[in-house]
């Protein structure tokens, strides 16, 4: 049976984990009550997938793989979530960008979900049976995430003059980061998914009266541990309790 190396698993796990953390921050802050519930559910979906992938990766790692981890304890999903530094995370840069505007949140979710739907479809048909089972479950959830993001993209893009302006600005700001998002993960055997991703995202943007940006700079490095300052701040908040009370049981 094929076993997927932990470095590959961490790329997808970290995308989901960081996304879950940002979406959770919208709880009680979303533009309407129903959206509070929806974003929380999406965050929980992403967290659930992250846990499964982190657990799978942890089983293949020894304590020395995480310098901050206790040397006498096995690596667990908690070890990988709470004891790695920002340079040890392998998420793409897109997901760590701050959700400082609701249009940005929707843009990030649209771009990520369009990628994850196709990614999980490919992985669910792969030879790694454990990963295929995880991806099969995640694919169903991602289809809902994509539909939710699509509806809000249409609502904002083809809404008022102000909502259109802010949604277009979010698309313009986020677009350069999508090149890293859909690039092949080194060693994964996955082909470049950008053509499939564009086939999904393009019609949605057009229907929302939004313009897809052209070429330009293509920031990257997240998969290699080179991140923006935003990830450090997010991890400081996410990891503070675990680090302040090591080994505590609740």
Image (cartoon, grey):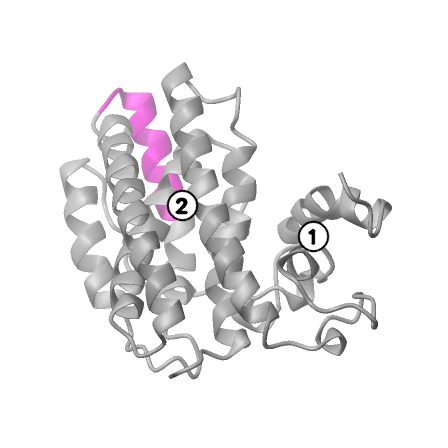
- Main SS class of the magenta portion in the image: helix
- Is residue 25 visible in the rendered structure shown here? yes
Q: Which residue is drawn at 30% across and 38% down?
A: 149
Q: How many marks?
A: 2
- Is residue 92 visible in the rendered structure shown here? no
For label 1, the SS is: helix
Residue ranking furthest to the top: 33
In the picture, measured across the screen, residue 181 lies left or right of residue 209, that is: right
In the picture, measured across the screen, residue 39 lies left or right of residue 202, that is: right
Q: Residue at x 34, y 82 (%)?
A: 189
Residue 167 inside the magenta-drawn segment: yes
Which stretch did the figure color magenta?
159-172
Residue that carries the numbered disc 1 in the rendered image: 232
Question: Nearer the N terminus, badge 2 or badge 1?
Answer: 2
Nearer to me, 27 or 158: 27
Nearer to me, 206 or 89: 89
User: Which class describes the residues within 10 Å of circle 1: few (<14), some (14-19), or many (20+)?
Assistant: some
Q: Is residue 46 above or below residue 59?
A: above
- x, y percentage for residue 145? 31, 42
Q: Which residue is drawn at 62% across and 67% down?
A: 226
The image quadrant where one finds the N terminus is bottom left
The picture quadrant where one finds residue 55 is: bottom right
User: Which class describes the residues within 10 Å of circle 2: few (<14), some (14-19), or many (20+)?
Assistant: many
The image quadrant where one finds the C terminus is top right
For label 2, the SS is: helix
- x, y percentage for residue 245? 85, 45
Q: Is residue 97 above or below residue 89?
A: above
Work out how far the residue at label 2 is from the one at label 1, CA to CA, in angstroms.
Answer: 19 Å
**Which label belongs to residue 108?**
2
- x, y percentage for residue 64? 76, 77
**Which label belongs to residue 32?**
none
Residue 177 inside the magenta-drawn segment: no
């Amino acid at each position: 049976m094929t076993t997927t190396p932990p470095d590959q698993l961490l790329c997808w796990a970290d995308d989901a984990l960081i996304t879950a953390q940002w979406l959770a921050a919208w709880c009680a802050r979303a533009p309407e009550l129903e959206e509070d519930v929806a974003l929380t559910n999406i965050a929980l979906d992403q967290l659930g997938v992250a846990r499964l992938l982190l657990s799978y990766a942890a089983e293949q790692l020894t304590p020395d793989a995480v310098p901050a981890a206790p040397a006498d304890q096995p690596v667990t999903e908690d070890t990988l979530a709470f004891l790695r530094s920002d340079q040890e995370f392998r998420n793409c840069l897109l997901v760590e960008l701050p959700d400082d505007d609701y249009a940005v949140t929707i843009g990030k979710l649209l771009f990520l979900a369009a990628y994850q739907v196709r990614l999980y479809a490919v992985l669910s048909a792969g030879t790694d049976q454990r990963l295929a089972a995880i991806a099969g479950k995640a694919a169903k959830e991602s289809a809902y995430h994509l539909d939710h993001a699509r509806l809000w993209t249409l609502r904002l893009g083809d809404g008022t003059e102000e909502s259109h302006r802010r949604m277009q600005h979010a698309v313009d700001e986020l677009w350069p980061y999508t090149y890293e998002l859909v690039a092949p993960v080194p060693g994964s055997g996955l082909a470049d998914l950008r053509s499939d991703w564009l086939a999904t995202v393009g019609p949605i943007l057009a229907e929302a009266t939004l313009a897809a940006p052209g070429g330009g700079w293509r920031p990257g490095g997240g998969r290699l541990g080179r991140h923006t300052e935003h990830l450090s701040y997010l991890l400081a908040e996410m990891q503070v309790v675990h680090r302040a009370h090591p080994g505590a049981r609740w």
